Each structure stands twice: as C-alpha cells, then as structure tokens.
Image (cartoon, rainbow, N blue to C red):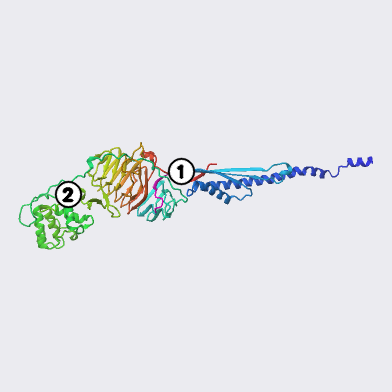
C-alpha cells in the first residue's frame, strides 16, 4: 500500500491538464478583455463620429428655433450611430454653439466571472457657428417676394461681404431677370433664391436681427427758416411789341430766358408738341434755342421766310431766296427738327409780345424743364422706370454750405460745389433730392428722414460723396429712416422708395438704413460704392436695376474708410470646438 501511494505521488503524468485547468480562467479573462476592448474602441469611434455630425448639423441649421435644436441634434445622432449601446443624450444649445454628450455602459462579456465590472462609456462634441463675415446687403422684410432683386444688365460685385434676405418667400432673392450673375462672398435667404448667384446660396438660414433697431434718430428741431420757401425766378419781361410783322425796331437781345420760354411753350402745346413727356427732346430744344437767340429783326425775317417757303423752312436740300438775307439758323438743320411756322410765331410772341404768365412761385428748376409741376406738387422723372418722383420745393443752387438741423419739406440740391457741414440733418415731410448733375459732399454726417414723403433721391447724373459719423449714437449711419415712435416729434415711419437713378452715383462710407422703405439703384451707368471702402445697404426691400454699364461694387473695409465696422455679421460656417 505504501508502494502504491509512493508511485502515485511520484507520478507526474497529466500535469498539463492540471496546469491548463488552473490557467483557463486567466486566459479567458484576457481573451474577454481583448474582445471587449475592441468593442469599446469601436463604440467610442461610432459615438464620436455621430456626435460630430449631430452638433455640426444642429449648429448650422438656423431655420429652426434653439429649443428645436436639441431634438434636431438627437435625431442626427441616432441616424449616424450604428453601435449597440443604449445611450443617454444631453445637450446644451446657444445661439452660436451646440454641445452634445452621450453616456452609456459597456457590459463586459465575462466580467462577472473574473470580477471585472461593466465599463462606462462617455463622449462629447461641440460645434460653434462662425460669424466673422460681414453682411453688406440686408433685406429686413419677413415675407416679401423678390426682397432682393437683380434686374436687367447691372453688374453686382461684393466679393468681400455677404447678401442676406430675412424673407421666407421662395424667391426672397431673385436674379432670374439679370443678365450678369451677381457675385458676393456668400448669399443666404431664409426662404429661397431664384436665378443664379455666385456662389450658390446657402440653405437653412436664420433671420438676421436689425442691427440698428434701437438707434434713436436725431432730435427734430425748429424748421430751418432759410429753406422754408423756395427761391423764385426773378426775371423781367420786356413788352416791346405784339408779335406783328410790322417794321418796328426790336431789341437785339431776347429778354426772356430759355427756361421760361420752354415752360410757356409746354403750356401752349400741352407737352406733346415738343417731342417728349419732359418737353423738347435735345434736337428740338436746340432748334428752339436757335430761334430764341435771334435778334428781334432776324426773328421777324424768319417769319417772313416761312410765309414764302411754306410750313417747314427746309433750306438745306432745296434752297430758295427766302432762306437768305438774314441770320437763318436752319440752313443746315434736319427738317424734322425745324420748328413749325406756328411755333416760331409763338416764340416771337412770347419773347416780344404778350407773355403767358406762369403760375406764381414757380422755381427755376420747373422753368428749366428739370422738374414738373403737377397739381401744385413738384416731380422729377429722371429715373430708369419713368416714374414720377416727388421733389422738394425748397431748392438751393451751387456754391453753398449747408448746416445741420431740420429741413421741413425736404430739400432739393440743384447745383455744384454744395457742402454739408459735420452733424445731423433731418429731412421732415419731404425728400432730399440731388438733381440735374448736382455735386455735393457731406463729411461726418447722418441724413435722417422722417414723415410723409421723406426719401432719398439721387437723380440726373448727380454725384454725392458722403462719410458717416464716427462717434455718437448714430455712428456708422450715413442715411437713416427714423422710426423711433417713442421719441418726441413726427417719428411715425412711412413707406417710400429711395432712389439712386439715372446715372447718379454715391461714394459712400457708411450704411444706408431704410428699415420700412425700399432702396432702388437703377439707370444707365449708375454706380454706387465703386470709390467707397465700406458700404452697407439695409432696407425693407432692395432692387438693383440698370442698363449696360451699370454696376454696383461693395466693400466693407471700415479701417480704410475710417468708420466703425459695417453691421451685421453673417453666419458663414461652423467648426468643431470639442
């Protein structure tokens, strides 16, 4: 028995099995750990990728509310997560960022056997919305179609700034009718874009807040007395004859100004007899002027020549003796431009006979044919769409320095070398119009508009150079529609159209702000911003329209312009920050 026991104890066969039995548990634990580690790594990658996609999508979608971004992020996470864990999501959302956290637990395969507990899994990601890009064209209307419209043959370039519309209309930005593709740093509309723009418009835009909504306009003061009434035409008439063909001595110099003559001919001929809605076309005007400049005796001889020759004195193709012997202005004139005998007689009668008295208090701008007087109000048609544009009766010529204050009834600038001193100007119940190739400069000013008919009109090839205030509550604003209803005075906003038209140009450093009105830039060879370093255009709606050669070039280099930064900012992309 001892021998058997000794042999058994000394027998080493089967030790491998014992060793294996003793080591199987550690081996199982190591294998399980390797498998679980691989699964955890894969899960974490899946979670991280899904989190990144979710926060980028939620931060970039500004078409939804902040509250809705929580659910939006969770939906995107679930759509991109392919793992097998049960995860709890929590988020924090601001107007500029979205952060999302995913938490769960990975159950170890043999964890309970080998004493290893389940492993918690947690990851997070955050994205921030960048707003470094400047908006230089902003339409504030919430629902207007074509709130920003490009029409006809105008070239639009804003390569350093963005174009944005708050309108929910499917055609909030419309470039379908424009020959040239508008170019900007970016285009974005809450609604949609029709036509081609460069680059393509971004989607899911949020409405941009009005950056000047709380800016208070300048105080409305007592009306400036020097422009409470317009300047009148102070010309005299020499009643030296009655227009007869008798041999009487008449003055060598015509006593009636050309403007007065045109006005009275328009009254006689009801406009249509002179060629256009504004009176004579250029050729007819030149022919009338040729008659107007004749001496009295030569004009009488011209009438006699008409009697001999017929209704139209065509002395170029078939000259007759009646065409000579006096100063005949029509020897080399197109027959279609030669005034009729009756018109020459009227010119004679107006100049040397009984005048047709013009209405009282008619300014030179009407007598000169630049402005129409309709039902006691003044209008200009010097714009691309031939629409009547109200003009203030308060008119000033050139070579004048204007001072800050309240201009009741508006103001019409009709001359060159006009300078506005530094300060705040308020144009109340009437337009500010730059008429008839006028030229003006305004340094460190804000032009405010309030009341009925208070709009900006840059017409007829006029040029305005303006720089906004750099300090004070209205800094950065060159033009401002005053809409502060809580302040004293007439602050009730009124609709209207502000125009830069008919070849006019504005060299502007600052922002044109018309929150409840439209801004129309139109006309052949119109330009705005081509000589400006920093321009902002904010209106209820905006339209850019022009013939061949018309262009709009905008930039926002406020440092170069020496003014505060142009506002507001655009949502120009998102980036991961966590």
Q: In the rendered structure, which segment of residues is drawn in magenta? A: 129-144
10 Å crowding of disc 1: few (<14), some (14-19), many (20+):
some
The location of residue 289, given as percent across then percent down, is 16, 53
Residue matched to label 2: 360
Q: Quadrant of residue 322?
A: bottom left
In the rendered image, the vertical position of residue 497 relative to residue 224, given as above or below: below
Q: Earlier in the sequence, mark 1 or mark 2?
A: 1
Element assignment for label 2: loop
Total marks placed: 2
10 Å crowding of disc 2: few (<14), some (14-19), many (20+):
few
Identify the image quadrant of the N terminus.
top right
**Is residue 459 found inside the magenta-colored segment of the image?**
no
Look at the image and tell me whether residue 44 can be seen: yes
Residue matched to label 1: 131
The residue closer to the viewer here, 9 or 231, is 231
The residue closer to the viewer here, 22 or 78, is 78
**Is residue 136 found inside the magenta-colored segment of the image?**
yes
The location of residue 172, given as percent across then percent down, is 41, 53
The location of residue 206, given as percent across then percent down, is 45, 48
The location of residue 413, given as percent across then percent down, is 25, 45
Q: In the figure, is residue 558 to the left or right of 574? A: left
**CA distance separating discs 1 and 2:** 58 Å
The residue closer to the viewer here, 252 or 422, is 422
Q: State which mark lies toward you, 1 or 2.
A: 2
Look at the image and tell me whether residue 326 can be seen: no
């Amino acid at each position: 028995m001892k021998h058997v026991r000794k042999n058994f104890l000394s027998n080493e066969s089967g030790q491998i099995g014992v060793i294996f039995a003793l080591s199987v548990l550690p081996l199982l634990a190591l294998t399980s750990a390797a498998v679980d580690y691989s699964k955890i790594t894969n899960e974490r990658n899946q979670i991280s990728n899904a989190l990144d996609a979710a926060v980028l999508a939620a931060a970039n979608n500004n078409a939804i509310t902040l509250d809705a971004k929580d659910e939006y992020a969770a939906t995107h996470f679930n759509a991109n997560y392919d793992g097998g864990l049960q995860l709890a999501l929590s988020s924090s959302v601001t107007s500029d960022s979205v952060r999302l956290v995913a938490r769960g637990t990975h159950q170890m395969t043999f964890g309970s056997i080998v004493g290893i507990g389940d492993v918690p899994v947690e990851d997070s990601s955050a994205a921030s919305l960048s707003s470094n890009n400047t908006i230089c064209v902003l339409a504030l209307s919430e629902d207007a179609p074509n709130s920003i419209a490009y029409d006809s043959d105008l070239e639009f370039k804003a390569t350093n700034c963005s174009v944005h519309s708050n309108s929910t209309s499917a055609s909030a930005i419309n470039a379908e009718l424009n020959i040239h593709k508008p170019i900007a740093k970016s285009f974005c509309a809450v609604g949609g874009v029709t036509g081609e723009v460069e680059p393509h418009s971004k989607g899911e835009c949020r409405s941009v807040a009005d950056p000047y909504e709380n800016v208070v306009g300048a105080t409305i003061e007592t009306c400036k007395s020097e422009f409470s009434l317009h300047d009148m035409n102070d010309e005299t008439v020499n009643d030296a004859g009655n227009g007869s063909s008798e041999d009487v001595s008449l003055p060598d110099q015509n006593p009636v100004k050309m403007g007065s003559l045109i006005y009275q001919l328009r009254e006689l001929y009801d406009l249509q007899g002179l060629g256009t809605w504004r009176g004579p076309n250029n050729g007819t005007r030149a022919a009338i002027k040729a008659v107007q400049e004749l001496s009295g005796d030569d004009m009488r001889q011209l009438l006699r020549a008409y009697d001999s020759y017929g209704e139209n004195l065509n002395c170029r193709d078939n000259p007759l003796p009646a065409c000579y012997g006096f100063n005949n202005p029509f020897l080399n004139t197109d027959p279609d431009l030669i005034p009729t005998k009756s018109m020459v007689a009227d010119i004679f009668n107006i100049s040397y006979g009984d005048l047709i008295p013009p209405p009282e208090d008619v300014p030179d701008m009407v007598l000169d044919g630049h402005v129409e007087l309709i039902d006691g109000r003044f209008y200009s048609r010097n714009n691309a769409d031939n629409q009547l544009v109200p003009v203030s009766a308060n008119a000033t010529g050139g070579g004048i320095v204007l001072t800050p204050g309240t201009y009741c009834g508006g103001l019409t600038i009709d001359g060159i070398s006009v300078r506005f001193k530094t300060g705040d100007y308020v144009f109340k119940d009437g337009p500010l119009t730059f008429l008839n190739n006028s030229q003006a400069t305004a340094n460190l000013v804000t032009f405010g508009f309030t009341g009925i008919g208070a709009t900006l009109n840059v017409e007829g090839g006029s040029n305005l150079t303006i720089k906004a205030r750099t300090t004070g509550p209205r800094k950065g604003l060159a033009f401002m529609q005053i809409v502060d209803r809580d302040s004293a005075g007439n602050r009730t906003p009124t609709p209207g159209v502000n125009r830069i038209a008919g070849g006019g140009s504005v060299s502007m450093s600052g922002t044109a702000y018309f929150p409840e009105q439209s801004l129309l830039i139109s006309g052949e060879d119109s330009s705005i911003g081509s000589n400006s370093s920093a321009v902002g255009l904010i209106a209820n709606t905006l339209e850019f329209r022009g013939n061949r050669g018309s262009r709009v070039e905008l930039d926002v280099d406020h440092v170069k312009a020496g003014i505060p930064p142009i506002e507001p900012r655009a949502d120009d992309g998102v980036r991961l920050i966590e």
